[in-house]
Amino acid sequence: EAGVAQSPRYKIIEKRQSVAFWCNPISGHATLYWYQQILGQGPKLLIQFQNNGVVDDSQLPKDRFSAERLKGVDSTLKIQPAKLEDSAVYLCASSLGKRGSTDTQYFGPGTRLTVL
Amino acid sequence: AQTVTQSQPEMSVQEAETVTLSCTYDTSESDYYLFWYKQPPSRQMILVIRQEAYKQQNATENRFSVNFQKAAKSFSLKISDSQLGDAAMYFCAYTRGNQFYFGTGTSLTVIP
């Protein structure tokens, strides 16, 4: 089966610019996650969707970050405006969602963002 | 907030030998799940093994096994017969409900 797809793989922008990341989860997976992984740290969950609804976004910096999953499939994560500290790898993951958070998560390759 | 601690930033092991990666966590809950994920240099994170806290039996997946000590809040990963392909970052993760917490990772080097 096809895995979680993410694009772009790399992105370099200047601070105060905007950027968007795209994620296509595994077909049939109801739950989608966005993580931020800063160099040298473990992934930090930003937002979790169940179908097209937000389950948890408590760690999402809502003044500059936004995410949507309009049709319950693909998702986009946007940063506007970007700051230097947003430089990180942004990981998307998906899971079946049948048993909630105890599902195995399948991760995409990530998007490496560099903010200059 | 829950915390997951991996006290070994780097570990190395000789090929075919056994290595143990440490993980401790902080929680006041009794029902939760623990995971070990592997992240090779290509950065695609994959699940290695999972453990349900209500199960006393330690999980095993082929050459990978865990030592789950609930009272001590410890969850170590043992890799037996290490192979070159085991070289990667290993992350310990805790989850309960909608909350997910990862440790800072252990970089494992396998020496031929």
Image (cartoon, coloured by chain):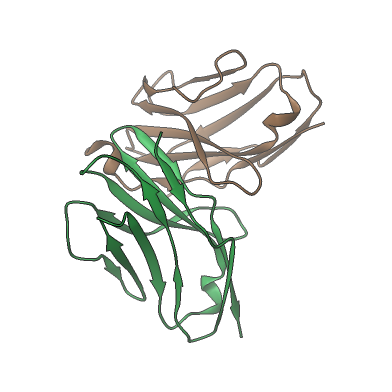
Chain colours: A brown, B green
Going 40% across and 55% down the picture, which residue do you hit? B24
Q: If the image is split into quadrants, where does the C terminus of chain A sit?
A: top right
Q: Is residue A1 visible?
A: no
User: Could you say which quadrant of the image residue A31 lies in?
Assistant: top left
Q: Is residue B85 left or right of residue B49?
A: right
User: Could you say which quadrant of the image residue B15 lies in?
Assistant: bottom right
Residue A70 position, x and y percent, is 43, 18
Residue A51 position, x and y percent, is 33, 25
Q: Is residue B1 visible?
A: yes
Going 21% across and 43% down the picture, which residue do you hit? B31
Please give the count of numbered marks on the rendered protein. Answer: 0
Q: Is residue A10 left or right of residue A62?
A: right
Residue A32 position, x and y percent, is 40, 33
Towards the viewer: B22 or B89? B22
Towards the viewer: A62 or B27? B27
Going 51% across and 37% down the picture, which residue do you hit? A44
In the rendered image, the residue lying farthest to the front is: B72
Residue B111 position, x and y percent, is 61, 82
Going 54% across and 63% down the picture, which residue do you hit? B8
Looking at the image, is B27 positioned above or below residue B75?
above
Looking at the image, is B88 positioned above or below residue A42?
below
